[in-house]
Image (cartoon, rainbow, N blue to C red):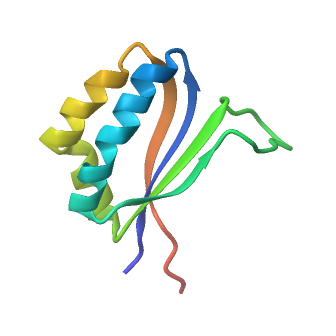
Amino acid sequence: MAKGYWIASVDVKNEEAVKRYAAGNHPIFDKFGGHYLVRAQKFEVPEGSSRSRLIIVEFPDYASALACYHSPEYQTNKKIREGHLVADFIIVEGYDGP
């Protein structure tokens, strides 16, 4: 079964609020089997454009990635970051081969 991923490219406006939001994500991710693969400020964009940070969270499957995002716990925690960061955010199913 293919894994699921959250991929976010963000610009942070208020570091302290975003730290509280990120800390609140850990127990929510644990509940849905998610974990950070990438939390980077150092990267190169050889084509196209990006924001200042890139985040990738891996879940056991696409359904878990969606369920986590839409969960009441995450929707409540997400309010902490509102107005404190700008994000391009996608949820994607990974490639499981032919």
Horizontal and vertical percent position of residue 17: 40, 21
Horizontal and vertical percent position of residue 27: 25, 52
Q: State the residue in front, 35 or 65.
A: 35
Residue farthest to the left, as pictured: 72
Residue at the image point whose x is 55% and y is 22% from the top: 12
30 to the left or right of 9: left
Residue at the image point whose x is 41% and y is 71% from the top: 3
Residue farthest to the bottom, as pictured: 98
71 to the left or right of 80: left
Give the number of callouts: 0
Q: Is residue 18 above or below residue 28?
A: above
Horizontal and vertical percent position of residue 89: 47, 38
Q: Check the picture and name the quadrant holding the N terminus.
A: bottom left
Residue at the image point whose x is 36% and y is 30% from the top: 20
Horizontal and vertical percent position of residue 82: 35, 18
40 to the left or right of 64: right
Q: Is residue 57 above or below residue 81?
A: below
Residue at the image point whose x is 78% and y is 36% from the top: 48
Q: State the residue in front, 48 or 76.
A: 76
